[in-house]
Image (tube, rainbow, N blue to C red):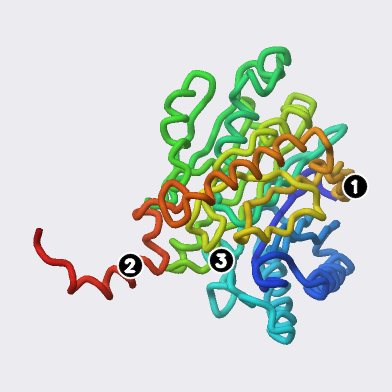
């Protein structure tokens, strides 16, 4: 085995059961069968298949590096096979995240979400994989800032000498398809200026000052790829923990605050991000509210030891309770902002069609 391993998390919505609330067990089994064959052939070291809401999540370790065609093609083929199963079962939105007719080297820009990182395993290598449903890729901006730049959240920024110099954030402008690198704490205010605009500027990667990769997030915007609303991004995030990086508890701590994210019903509403146990990741109330799960693994020579269901903890009951209270408050707004997204954010929904239909009825005031 080479010194470096690659951890790839690739997800897609290939069919909901029932509606957009969950996934049928046959899709999970189909994905496991396909990845088992790949592992037997030596393409993968290990894998784990799970789901968050109606999103199928493929967690894979291998030695091919990031953006590897073999791995991305494998994931694409798994999603295609699962789509066929979904169609046979007449599941809702079968294959909705597969926005291309055929594979073309990488799944990036084709619909599925991707978070990958390549690194040398440390003496102990704990990682947390966050998976969300009914929200957009900007949902990770606030947690990632708190994890890697906020000393009130992460004590290690003050106490741990290996973290004291801070971290480097790679931020993507998803509208202009360009990126900027900002260093904290010295450029903290510049960073906040951008990442507070969660629909346009999205944190993609976080590094320690010595170059060690610490976190990787999916940043695709389905509406920008498709040119219309086809479903929310439902992003994934990989975070390495401990030994010169934030501790497991510091990485989880931001989710004790159910912050407001975009998504929810028809991808057109603001709502609280609710941290839940695996078995509770079935958003149903108004197709929500948005959910996030946290799967903890110990990596051992590329093997995935786990997962531990890290939000299956009464310590997060307060966040869940507040999320329900916030959901009640926002739902009472009905079709009014700020529950419904602003007009600019409805650009890729049916709103332009409705405006065009009624355009001839507008007259000068």
User: What is the quadrant of residue 365 in the picture?
Assistant: bottom left
The x and y percentages for residue 48 are 83, 58
* Secondary structure state at the residue bearing disc 1: strand
The image shows residue 249, relative to residue 227, as above or below, that is above
The image shows residue 106, relative to residue 206, as above or below, that is below
Which residue carries the number 1 mark? 305
Please rate how many residues cluster around mark 2, counting C-alpha atoms within 10 Å: few if below 14, some from 14 to 19, many from 20: few
Gap in angstroms between the C-alphas marked 3 and 2: 22 Å
* Secondary structure state at the residue bearing disc 3: loop
Q: Which of marks 1 and 3 is nearer the N terminus?
A: 3
* Res. 335 visible in picture: yes
Which mark is nearer the camera, 3 or 2? Answer: 2
Please rate how many residues cluster around mark 3, counting C-alpha atoms within 10 Å: few if below 14, some from 14 to 19, many from 20: many
Q: Earlier in the sequence, mark 1 or mark 2?
A: 1
The image shows residue 352, relative to residue 124, as above or below, that is below
Q: Earlier in the sequence, mark 3 or mark 2?
A: 3
The image shows residue 256, relative to residue 350, as above or below, that is above
Which residue carries the number 3 mark? 111
Q: In this view, does 51 lie to the left or right of 115?
A: right
Q: Which sits in the foreground, 103 or 231? A: 231
The x and y percentages for residue 99 are 53, 72
Look at 53% across and 20% down and name the residue there. 185
Q: Is residue 307 left or right of residue 22?
A: right
Look at 74% across and 48% down and name the residue there. 293
Furthest toward the left, the residue is 364
Contact (CB < 8 A) between labels 3 and 2? no
Contact (CB < 8 A) between labels 1 and 3? no
Please rate how many residues cluster around mark 1, counting C-alpha atoms within 10 Å: few if below 14, some from 14 to 19, many from 20: some
Which residue carries the number 2 mark? 352
Q: Residue 94 carries which label?
A: none
User: What is the quadrant of residue 294 in the picture?
Assistant: top right
The x and y percentages for residue 235 are 61, 53
């Amino acid at each position: 085995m080479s010194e470096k391993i690659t951890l790839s998390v690739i997800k897609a919505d290939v069919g909901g059961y029932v509606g957009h609330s969950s996934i049928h067990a046959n899709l999970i089994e189909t994905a496991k069968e396909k990845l088992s064959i790949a592992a037997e052939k030596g393409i993968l070291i290990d894998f784990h298949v799970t789901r968050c809401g109606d999103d199928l999540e493929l967690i894979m370790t291998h030695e091919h590096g990031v953006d590897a065609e073999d791995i991305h093609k494998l994931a694409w083929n798994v999603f295609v096979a699962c789509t066929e199963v979904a169609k046979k079962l007449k599941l809702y939105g079968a294959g909705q995240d597969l926005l291309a007719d055929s594979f073309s080297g990488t799944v990036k820009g084709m619909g599925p979400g991707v978070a990958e990182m390549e690194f040398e395993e440390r003496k102990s290598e704990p990682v947390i994989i966050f998976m969300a449903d009914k929200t957009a890729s900007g949902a990770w901006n606030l947690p990632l800032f708190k994890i890697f730049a906020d000393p009130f959240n992460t004590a290690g920024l003050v106490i741990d000498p290996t973290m004291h110099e801070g971290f480097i954030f790679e931020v993507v402008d998803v509208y202009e398809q360009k990126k900027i690198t900002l260093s904290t704490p010295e450029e903290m205010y510049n960073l906040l200026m951008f990442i507070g605009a969660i629909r346009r500027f999205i944190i993609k990667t976080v590094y320690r000052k010595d170059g060690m990769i610490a976190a990787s997030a999916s940043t695709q915007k389905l509406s920008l790829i498709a040119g219309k609303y086809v479903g929310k991004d439902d992003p994934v995030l990989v975070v390495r923990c401990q030994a010169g990086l934030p501790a497991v508890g510091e990485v989880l701590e931001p989710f004790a605050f159910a912050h407001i994210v975009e998504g929810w019903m028809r991808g057109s509403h603001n709502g609280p991000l609710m941290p839940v146990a695996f078995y509770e990741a079935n958003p149903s109330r108004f197709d929500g509210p948005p959910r996030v799960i946290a799967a903890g693994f110990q990596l051992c020579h590329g093997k995935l030891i786990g997962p531990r269901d890290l939000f299956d903890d009464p310590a997060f009951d307060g966040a869940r309770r507040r999320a329900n209270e916030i959901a009640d408050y926002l739902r009472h707004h009905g079709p009014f902002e700020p529950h419904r997204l602003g007009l600019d954010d409805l650009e890729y929904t049916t709103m332009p069609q409705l405006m065009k239909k009624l355009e001839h009825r507008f007259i000068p005031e």
